[in-house]
Image: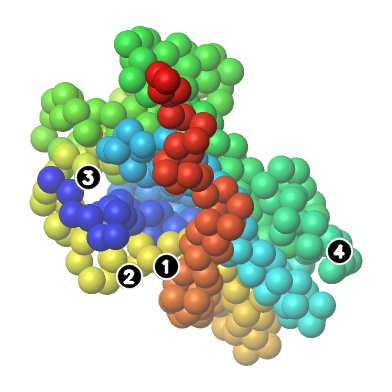
Amino acid sequence: MMRENGQKLESLDAVRGIGAFVVMWHHLVLGFQPNWKFDLSLATPPWIRVWYHGDFAVHVFFVLSGFVLSYSFVKSGNMDVLRAAAVKRYWRLFLPVAVSILISYLLFIAGTYANRDAARFMHQEDSSWLNRWFAFPPSWMGAIAEAFYGAFFHYEVSQTYNSSLWTMQTEFLGSFFIFAFQGLTRGLRYRPLIFLLLFAVFLRQEQLWMVDFLAGAAICDLFHSQSLWIPPPIGLAAFGVLLAGTSPAWFIATIGDPLIPDWMWNYIPMVSALWVILGVLWSPFLQRQLSTGPLRLLGRMSFPLYLIHLLVECSLGCRVYLWVVRDAGFSHNSGFITASLTTIAVSLGLAWIGSFTVEPQSIALGRWVYARWFQPLKSADNDLCLTKPTAN
């Protein structure tokens, strides 16, 4: 049903790449057209709004992480696989994060960031999303601290060198939750009940990000057992995409009052992400479409794209906007379009470079750490300890 390439699921990589693109567009909207997000989004059709729905994309990321981190262990049942994944995880995330922070620090001390200038020019300095970033003096000690520790254990939004790193703490915690859950419950008779209890706990605490990871692990179980029937998967995925882009006011204006509490809308992005992933996993057609060359490339670029685009937007993108609108006298929308196209093009180019430089090295670093410090002794080396005593 699924095509694999080096134990990576190509179709899911493509979904992750599309999600990274959605996050980039989401940040461009927040920076230059915040009324799309906070005012006009209520009247925007879902098939348009979903393309800048960053929360939906992040839910997709976390569901995918729960699935992918569970996949090899559920498939093999080998505890060494789980141990290796746990050891490698920090280093796999660390190197791309550290490179993005290094780039950001260099841009910062060079005076390249123009996001606060752009916010002031747009008269949005009091509430602008752009005005929040890089409002502190750069410090190489602060950059090092965030790279090694802050991004994963103590993220500070007011002192960050890359606001996209807010997901890393959840990603890291969720990863080790999955490793612990898989290691402790593998083969247990009451594993489905444990799933349900944990779902109930996380939902009760409104820990929706952790629900994503657990749901990804549950989908992995169902995928390997082939025990789940779902409605036509293409329709399920399409409905998930449309639901993700739906706002309460648009629904009421076009269809009618849904007669559900307002708080339930907070769960829509999470539910939509689950449906999209289920639809892709159970649809050979969607897998074929998502495994084409350009989407495979976008999938390989997803993590670098996610990490680099905000740095490009706040530096080059904002400078292009100011040049077009303030200096050349064109309209705000012209500046937005020009800055967006510049940010997208440069971010994709840098992400492509990162996909064959930083990404392979982060994987190699994790493997080296595991092989150097955590590789278990071979069974032959343990024979002296494990062999039963023989009779004389």
Q: Earlier in the sequence, mark 3 or mark 1?
A: 3
What residue does disc 1 label?
A: 301
The Cα–Cα distance between marks 1 and 2, rounded to whole angstroms, is 6 Å
| Amino acid at pointer 2 | Leu
| Amino acid at pointer 3 | Val
Q: Which mark is residue 141?
A: 4
The x and y percentages for residue 358 are 53, 72
**How was the colour assigned to the protein in this rendering?**
rainbow
Q: Please report the residue visible at 69 percent of the width from the left and 51 percent of the height from the top.
A: 151
The x and y percentages for residue 347 are 50, 74
Q: Is residue 301 above or below residue 92?
A: below
What residue does disc 3 label?
A: 280
The quarter of the picture where the C terminus appears is: top left
| Amino acid at pointer 4 | Met
Q: Please report the residue visible at 71 percent of the width from the left and 43 percent of the height from the top.
A: 153
Q: Which mark is residue 297?
A: 2
The Cα–Cα distance between marks 2 and 3, rounded to whole angstroms, is 18 Å
